[in-house]
Each structure stands twice: as C-alpha cells, then as structure tokens.
Image (spheres, rainbow, N blue to C red):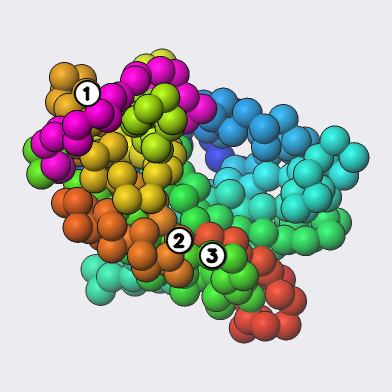
Amino acid sequence: MPAARVRPFHRGDRDQLTDLVNRHVAAVVPGVSVSVNTVLSELERRPEEFIVDPWVSERVTLVAESRGHVVAAAHLLRYRADDEVGDCYRDTGEVAWFVSHPPASFRPGTDEAADLLMSACLAQLARWRVRARLADGALPAPMVYGLPRNWPHIRAVYERAGFRHTGDTEVILLARVADLPLPEPPPGVSFARTLGECGTRFTAYADGRALGFIEVDTALARPERHVRAAGLADIGNLRGPGWEHHLLAHAADWLRLSGVDRLVAYETATDQAAIDRLTSAGFGELTRTDRGWEHRPGSGAQMPGR
C-alpha cells in the first residue's frame, strides 16, 4: 500500500468513514449498523451525552488516506478548563474513537497508516496543551464504548502510542427475550409499570413495599440518526436482590409486546455474582470492553511524527 497521508476529514469521506465505522460495530454487536447521517451528526455533537457533551470546546476529525481510500480515522475532543466542567474531564483532550483497517496480507502498510494517524492525534493533543490525554472507542452505536476486546488491532495502536488502560472492565451480556423467564409472580406480589430514569420501570410490590425494580430502554436508536438496531433493548437499572428473575420475567413480557427480541445487560467484570445471576436467567457474554485509557508519555514506543 502506498504511503498514507493524514489530513482533516472532508465531507466527501462520509461513505468510506461510515463503512469503516460499521465494520467495527459489527465485530462487537450483531445486527446493528449506523447511517451516514448518524456518523456526520456524531462529528458535530453527541446528543445522548447531555451532561458531558456541552463541556466540549473543540472537535477534530482526522483520516489517514492512501490512494484515495480512507484506511483509518479518529475523532478528537477537547474539554473546557472552567469550573463548570467535571473534574475528570476538565482541561483534558480525548481520542473519542479510533478506527482502522486491521493488518492483512492483501493490504500491507495498514499498521503504518494507523500509527501515522495516531501520531497526528498526539500532535493535536499536544497543541491543545491539555493536562491529560485520554482515549476511548465510543462509536455512535449501542453497546460500542470503551475499547472492546474484539478490536485487538486498535488496542495495539493505543498501546504502541503509550496509552494504558486505567479504568474498569465491563462485561456486555445479551439474551434472547424468548429465552428469558416467563412471568410467574408469587402470591401477594404485584407489579407497576412507570417511567424510570433509564427507560420503562417495572417495580415489584408486596404489602405496599417495593421489593425491587428493573428499567428497560427500548429507544436505543434516535430515529433521526438512523441507527439500525431494531428489536434491541437494554437494562438501564436492575435493583432487588432475590427478585431479579421475577423482574426480568415481567419486563420480558412487555418487551415481547414491543417487538423486542434481544435484551442487553452490562456488569462490571469484578461483580461475578451479578454476572452469574444474569447468565442463570438466560444471558450470555457478548464481549468485554476496557473503559478508561490514558496516555502515559514514555510508556509506549516512539511513533513516527511525534
């Protein structure tokens, strides 16, 4: 492959960039893809990040191009340094996501192109003079955040550049709604459906006392952004030790009426008890993702152009 060059994203790159993004999404979650409109919207603002996104002061999207073909791309964010910004984000710069073709015998030079792009990202972060350099892999699709284990080629680029995993690891679990328990509420237990913080809430009651609740979100895709995620919902909250199966069964009945056939759950990798409860109810591990990456100067190999 001819030597790549790094340049700012042009609108004419939109189809190639969307294809590259969707290849990465498909490796993480089945049956989900995003439209060109979704990708372009993501470059301007992230409406789902209604707390964090207003703190962003600058956005830059870069691509690595070889012979007219986009082989890698990255989106960078700069967060403001004023007191309104949360401590973790104040005066930081972030590689919000980084996508690249994986190394392949029929496409030599992809590693070099990805490293060249990462060098340009680090140079941009240096020009911003931020106090910390962060990284993530949060593409504009459900369940794609952190650095999924399905992208070893992206992890290799981050680590060669000196980024290190400093946060938590989360397990993403997926269940077919048809495999979830059927509702069989014990005598004296009733369920109420209300609006919750993270979706529709189902609360179990006995003698006027709340035993626990589950919240499911069936609106993972904003219609105007054209994310293909039909039949997919996730658990926003699940509270109620000992009542998880009953709550899941009641929520599943509602999801079937909604035409949802897959339900997603998230748990910290260290909480094996919570993972076991979900797997016993019909969930299976889909992937693991490592959240929280920070650049540690001197900890990675020196990269071209740095």
Tell me which corner region of the image, top left, top right, bottom left or bottom right, holds residue 54. Answer: top right
**Dots 2, 3 in contact, CB < 8 A:** yes
- Residue on which disc 3 sits: 168
Q: Which three-letter amino acid code belongs to the residue tagged 1?
A: Trp
Q: Which three-letter amino acid code belongs to the residue tagged 3?
A: Asp
Q: Which residues are magenta?
A: 180-200
Work out how far the residue at label 2 is from the one at label 3, CA to CA, in angstroms.
7 Å
Mark 1 / mark 3, whichever is N-terminal? 3
Q: In this orientation, does residue 293 appear?
A: yes
Magenta stretch: dominant secondary structure? loop
- Residue on which disc 2 sits: 268
Work out how far the residue at label 1 is from the one at label 3, CA to CA, in angstroms.
32 Å
Viewer-nearest of discs 1 and 2: 1
Residue 198's place in the image compared with 94, above or below, is: above
Work out how far the residue at label 1 is from the one at label 2, CA to CA, in angstroms.
26 Å
Q: Is-magenta flag for residue 189?
A: yes
Q: Name the residue located 34 percent from the left edge and 20 percent from the top edge.
A: 192
- Residue on which disc 1 sits: 254
Q: In this orientation, does residue 225 appear?
A: no
Task: Say the numbered circle drawn on residue 176.
Answer: none
Q: Using a 10 Å C-alpha cutoff, classify the residue at mark 3 as few (fewer than 14 neighbours), some (14 to 19) or many (20 or more).
A: some
Mark 2 / mark 3, whichever is N-terminal? 3
Q: Is residue 305 left or right of residue 276?
A: right
Mark 1 / mark 2, whichever is N-terminal? 1
